[in-house]
Amino acid sequence: MPQDPSLVAIAATARWRARIVAAAASAGITLTDPLAGVPGIRPLACTLGDLGVIVPRLGGEPSRAAIGAHSDSIADRELRDAVADVAALLSLHGNVVLDLDAGGRRATVKPDVVVSAAVDRPQWTEPAVTLPVGTDRRGAPLTVALTAGPGFEGTLLELARLVEADAA
């Protein structure tokens, strides 16, 4: 996760990372790569606003995703509210949002993207986007993570773009 609250962190495999870097380069955007040369999942960081430029350059329409949200199980009230707000925003944009904390009920649809606190370890660890969504009462950044299942990389970045646009 980036220390700068104006940065969005993207965790991606080498293949997906290459597509993101190429899309950014075609728009004249430079992404930082603090672990360049490290095999496997590597984080990238871009400034707020860059997702809106990068996502359309990735090509293809994002798939409609079932989105799962963990909020009730988050102890910190401000962070829990931030995750719930992001889930509600994505719902307003026509996405199906599943409550993953609904006690005892088994969802008939599995989520394709999970919205969680950035410190949580959701069902998948990549691809993921960690982005700032505000500050807590002490002024510290509140960050939310969006993590996608296999095949939903484009959707993940499109959803992150929606959240980013709303936070601006």
Image (cartoon, rainbow, N blue to C red):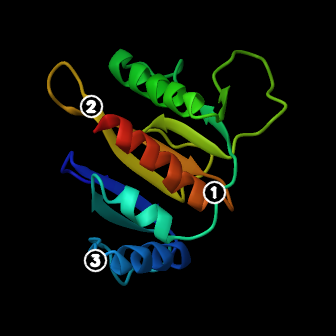
Per the model, the C-alpha gap separating discs 3 and 2 is 27 Å
Q: Quadrant of residue 78?
A: top left
Q: Amino acid at mark 3?
A: Gly
Does any portion of residue 115 appear in the rendered image? yes
| Mark before the other along the chain sequence, 3 or 2 | 3
Q: Amino acid at mark 2?
A: Gly
- Crowding at dot 2, Cα within 10 Å, few <14 / some 14-19 / many 20+, comes out as some
Residue 28: give its label: 3
Secondary structure beneath dot 3 equals loop
State the residue at coordinates (47%, 38%): 120
State yes or no: discs 2 and 1 in contact (Cβ < 8 Å).
no
| Mark before the other along the chain sequence, 2 or 1 | 1
Residue 134: give its label: 2
Of tags 3 and 2, which is closer to the observer?
3
State the residue at coordinates (53%, 25%): 88
Is residue 167 found left or right of 150 in the rendered image? left
> Is 70 located above or below residue 60 in the figure?
above
> Is 57 located above or below residue 94 in the figure?
below
